[in-house]
């Protein structure tokens, strides 16, 4: 086994190699451009900027490092050793699946499909006599699906943690088309994290780890107990995307985090059980795909079953979003709350709001109905220059004309739309 200095040297070398890897900067740029696109949509709909893409990107990288470190430590402790060829085949399948639907870019689908292809290859070990097919078929026969599925489970466990910790910060308000042609308010929950992973991989080199870290390690690949292992620092991106029109962003991320955690635990449990009962790898692969689809179905079902929340209220002015660094943020107004009174004056729509704000030129007092239907009293001083600006975005009303089309696209359709924009720009 490597001594402590040797292991540290390997880690430092891996970090240097990661920093020199162009994919790291491609992924960081991708995250920044996604948040910049989010900012552009906010400006189109509301003529304000609710998020700062650079700040979001830095936060995503910071939290992503935490998530990547968590996955790396747990993977090493559980003895999750993944072959390099398995990683690249999973990435290739994920990109291929994204051409059908962007959400299929998730590694759960690719890992599940790769496992099923591996089982097919084992049942039919003699492929057609073509050199390229034979090489790929050989890779499929050598796939180690159990540690790969376990790694996917750990990535989703980290995703659940990240969603719970910071998911609501990146939530972006939208106006979308509801039932019967009505425009309603919603929140797009979309976050990305740069999560580099430090993984043990089998190697032919004698300079790697040549002894088990503990008795029975690696747990998910017992046939490698006498092999050598190297550390691979892999750049990766973890993402989360969902839409809610029936809950506040905080409520939605709590629910999403909870179901993601259960999905990850169950998938990890099935992977763990497949070590002793190999036939369960089929169930684990099917659960990786079907279970993830069940998460999507559950989220949509919940949204359809509940009435839209971000619509006008007869009790007062319902807040869609709060603009940062404004009196509304200082007051502590939250999305989904209803402003009932301002300076003692009852308000029912945004036309009544600003005259009520000007009723007291030096101080602002409010009665606000919370999401739990409790009344809270807020107050703050009014400074020169902002007496007419509270800093809120209200839910859509009859005068709202613009909204977003939220149809789900495949990668081909998305690229087609981008090409069309380029032609129009030319």
Image (cartoon, helix red, strand yellow):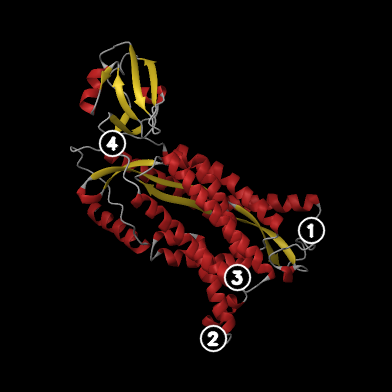
Residue 25 appears in the figure: no
User: Which of pointers 4 and 1 lies earlier in the amino acid sequence?
Assistant: 1
Q: Quadrant of the N terminus?
A: bottom right
According to the image, label 4 marks what residue?
395
Name the N-terminal-most of marks 4 and 2.
2
Q: Which residue is mark 3?
A: 281
Which comes before the other along the chain, label 1 or label 2?
Answer: 2
| Residue where numbered disc 1 is placed | 214
Mark 3 is surrounded, within 10 Å at the Cα level, by few (under 14), some (14 to 19) or many (20 or more) other residues, namely many
Dividing the picture into quadrants, the one containing residue 284 is bottom right
Tell me which corner region of the image, top left, top right, bottom left or bottom right, holds residue 186: top left
**Distance from the alpha carbon under mark 4 to that under mark 1:** 58 Å
| Badge 2 or badge 3: first in the primary sequence | 2
User: How crowded is the residue under tag 4: few (<14 C-alpha within 10 Å), some, or many (20+)?
Assistant: many
Whether residues under marks 2 and 3 lie with C-beta atoms below 8 angstroms apart, the answer is no
Mark 1 or 2: the one toward you? 1
Q: Name the foreground residue: 60 vs 271.
A: 271
> How far is the residue under mark 4 from the one under mark 2?
60 Å
Q: Dot 1, crowdedness within 10 Å: few (<14), some or many (≥20)?
A: few
Residue sitting at 51 percent across and 62 percent down?
Answer: 108
Q: Tell me the CA gap for discs 2 and 3.
A: 23 Å
């Amino acid at each position: 086994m490597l001594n402590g200095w040797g292991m540290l040297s390997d880690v430092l070398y891996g970090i240097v190699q990661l920093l020199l890897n162009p994919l790291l900067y491609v992924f960081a740029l991708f995250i920044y451009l996604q948040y910049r696109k989010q900012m552009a949509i906010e400006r189109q709909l509301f003529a304000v900027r609710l998020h700062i893409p650079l700040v979001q990107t830095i936060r995503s990288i910071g939290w992503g490092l935490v998530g990547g470190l968590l996955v790396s430590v747990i993977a090493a402790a559980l003895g999750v050793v993944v072959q390099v060829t398995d990683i690249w085949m999973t990435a290739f399948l994920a990109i291929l699946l994204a051409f059908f639907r962007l959400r299929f870019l998730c590694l759960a689908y690719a890992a599940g499909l790769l496992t099923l292809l591996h089982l097919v290859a084992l049942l039919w070990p003699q492929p057609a006599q073509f050199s390229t097919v034979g090489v790929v078929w050989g890779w499929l026969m050598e796939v180690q699906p159990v540690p790969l599925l376990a790694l996917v489970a750990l990535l989703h466990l980290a995703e659940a943690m990240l969603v719970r910790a910071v998911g609501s910060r990146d939530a972006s308000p939208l106006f979308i088309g509801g039932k019967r042609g009505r425009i309603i308010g919603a929140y797009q929950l979309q976050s990305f994290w740069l999560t580099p992973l430090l993984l043990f991989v089998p190697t032919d080199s004698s300079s790697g780890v040549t002894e088990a870290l503990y008795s029975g390690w690696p747990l998910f690949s017992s046939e490698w107990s006498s092999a050598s292992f190297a550390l691979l620092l892999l750049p990766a991106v973890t993402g989360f995307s969902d839409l809610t029109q029936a809950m506040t962003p905080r409520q939605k991320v709590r629910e999403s985090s909870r179901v993601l955690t259960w999905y990850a635990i169950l998938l990890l449990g099935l992977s763990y059980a497949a070590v002793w009962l190999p036939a369960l790898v089929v169930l684990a692969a099917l659960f990786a795909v079907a279970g993830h689809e069940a998460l999507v179905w559950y989220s949509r079902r919940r949204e359809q079953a509940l009435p839209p929340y971000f619509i006008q209220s007869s009790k007062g002015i319902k807040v869609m979003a709060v603009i940062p660094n404004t009196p509304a943020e200082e007051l502590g107004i939250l999305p989904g709350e209803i402003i009932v009174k301002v300076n003692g004056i009852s308000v029912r729509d945004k036309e009544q709001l600003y005259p009520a704000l000007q009723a007291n030129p030096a101080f602002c007092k409010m009665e606000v109905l919370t999401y739990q239907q409790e009344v809270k009293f807020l107050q703050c001083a009014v400074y020169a220059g902002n007496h007419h600006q509270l800093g809120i975005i209200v839910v859509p009303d009859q005068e709202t004309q613009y909204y977003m089309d939220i149809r789900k696209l495949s990668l081909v359709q998305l690229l087609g739309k981008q090409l069309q924009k380029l032609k129009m720009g030319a």
